[in-house]
Image: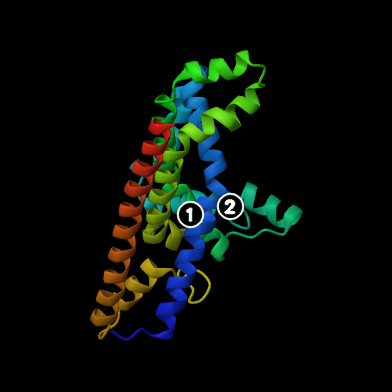
Amino acid sequence: MEFRPEDWIALALSLKVAAVAVLFSAPLAVLVAWLLVRREFWGKTLLNGLVHLPLILPPVVTGYLLLLSFGRKGFFGSFLEQELGLVFSFRWTGAALAAGVMGFPLMVRAIRLSLEAVDRRLEAAASTLGASPFRVFLTVTLPLTMPGLVAGAILAFAKALGEFGATITFVSNIPGETQTLAALIYTYTQTPEGDGPALRLTLVSIVISLAALAGSELLSRRMTARRTAA
């Protein structure tokens, strides 16, 4: 099974995009999950709906909304480019943003389920001993929620690796810049002799995804077992 140079480039780019997407969306996912579990406020149902919207909308629609918002002429895109020099449209950073948005609901859901299982009495005990709310969160709540965070992050990573519709709509399919593994597979399917390379990369995607899912389950079980033993 011989890989072409463009295959390695697309694989490396996909891994980078997925890693950046998870790294930057994880803190926000923790915050949103905490708000949905621990706070009652006006618009909570709306926030929950917005979080899960990427799972329901066609990926192309999500990509188009990102283009309208974070493109060079979009409100957020023009502001970020002028103030921070950060460009998303037709850049690998945009691919990371699209991947992060698509995987965000999976991460929030996993963290939310883990948060709901936390024994509030442990937090109350820490508060009674004089710990501030923020310290209680860092030393009690977050460690107990870690299995869900790890599982959600790995699931979001796997989702980001396979993201195609939102990415290609938002940042196109530029070799070496935005051409991820999924986009390269699509490119191969459009060529007369691309069946072999497309099948090869499809198998690679399946192996990586299965490894991520298995790793998520294994880590979650180990961390849950350690928490129970403690």
Label 2–label 1 contact, CB within 8 A? no
Q: Is residue 117 above or below residue 216?
A: above
Residue at coordinates 70% horizontally, 50% vertically from top-left?
A: 79
Q: Position of residue 208 (x, y in %)?
A: 34, 63
Question: In the visual, does 137 lie left or right of 44?
Answer: right
> Which image quarter is the C terminus in?
top left
Return the residue at label 2: 70
Residue 126 position by quadrant? top right
Q: Is residue 25 left or right of residue 82?
A: left
Left or right: residue 163 versus residue 101 is left
Q: Secondary structure at mark 2?
A: helix
Percent of width and height locating residue 106: 39, 42
Q: What is the three-letter code of the residue carrying label 2?
A: Phe
Crowding at mark 1 (Cα within 10 Å: few <14, some 14-19, many 20+): many
Residue depth check, mark 2 versus mark 1: number of the one nearer the observer = 1
Q: Is residue 163 visible?
A: yes
Local crowd at mark 2 within 10 Å, few (<14), some, or many (≥20)?
A: many
Q: Position of residue 29 (x, y in %)?
A: 51, 39
Residue shown at 72%/59% (left/top)?
85
Real-space Cα distance between discs 2 and 1?
10 Å
| Mark carried by residue 98 | 1
Where does the N terminus fall, quadrant-wise? bottom left
- Ranked by sequence position, the earlier of labels 2 and 1 is 2
Residue type, mark 1 in image = Ala
Q: Nearer the viewer, residue 135 or 28?
A: 135
Q: Is residue 61 visible?
A: no
